[in-house]
């Protein structure tokens, strides 16, 4: 009898996330097309993002992108860590640290800072400190999501 194939692409179970566990995502470069698509989708038409002609009058130089885009991309980079095992996104505090521009490459460093079983069996709560880093090592933003995560086995 053949051994069952291992399923790839599933996220971390609660048991895989002890306090202090750290992991990093791959990188993602933010393109001009990403900015245009995000502005059109979210309708964030603030001149800082949507008007190249007005850039000289802005307080922040360069082709900056909304922090909401950076946060969204960070969550997208983290999808492999919660695919199938993430049950709910419950809370987060977001702190923007520096501007992110078109052409910046970001990645996310995560550290488990809180972990406890939930009242209902088969799941637990995990909070991480997520640092979104740019290619130069600078921090774009930090956030602290609290997620409900599936346990590997439901206690019997």
Image: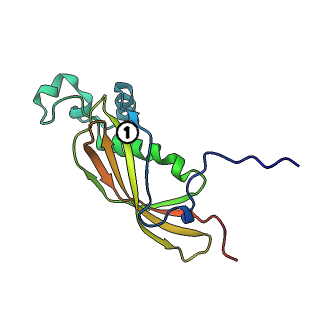
Residue furthest out toward the top: 53
Q: Which of 74 and 13 is in front in this view?
A: 13
From the viewer's perspective, tell me whether residue 44 is left or right of residue 88.
Answer: left
Image position of 13 with respect to 154: above or below: above
Q: Dot 1: within a 10 Å radius of its alpha carbon, few (fewer than 14), some, or many (20 or more) residues? A: few
Q: What element carries label 1?
A: helix
Q: Is residue 122 left or right of residue 21?
A: right
Q: In the image, residue 128 lies at what x, y percent?
A: 40, 60
Q: Is residue 148 above or below residue 31?
A: below
Point out the residue furthest to the right here: 1
Could you say where residue 130 lies in the image, as x and y percent from the top left? 36, 54
Q: Which residue is drawn at 64% across and 45% down?
A: 8
Q: Quadrant of residue 43?
A: top left
For residue 127, side relative to residue 7 (left or right): left
Whole-percent x and y of residue 72? 40, 44
Colour logic: rainbow
Question: Within the image, what quadrant is residue 110 found in?
Answer: bottom left
Q: Residue 93: percent from the left, percent from the top?
A: 32, 59
Q: Mark 1 points at which residue?
A: 42
């Amino acid at each position: 009898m053949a051994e069952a194939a291992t399923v790839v692409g599933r996220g971390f179970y609660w048991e895989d996330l002890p306090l202090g566990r750290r992991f990093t995502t791959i990188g993602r470069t933010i393109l001009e097309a990403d900015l245009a698509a995000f502005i059109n989708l979210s309708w964030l038409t603030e001149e800082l993002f949507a008007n190249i002609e007005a850039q000289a009058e802005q307080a922040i130089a360069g082709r900056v992108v909304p922090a909401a885009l950076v946060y969204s991309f960070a969550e997208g980079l983290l999808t492999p860590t919660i695919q199938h095992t993430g049950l709910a996104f419950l809370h987060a505090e977001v702190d923007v640290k520096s501007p992110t521009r078109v052409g910046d490459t970001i990645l996310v460093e995560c550290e488990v800072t809180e972990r406890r079983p939930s009242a209902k069996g088969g799941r637990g709560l995990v909070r991480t400190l997520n640092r979104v880093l740019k290619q130069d090592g600078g921090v774009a933003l930090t956030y602290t999501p609290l997620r409900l995560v599936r346990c590997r086995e439901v206690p019997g």
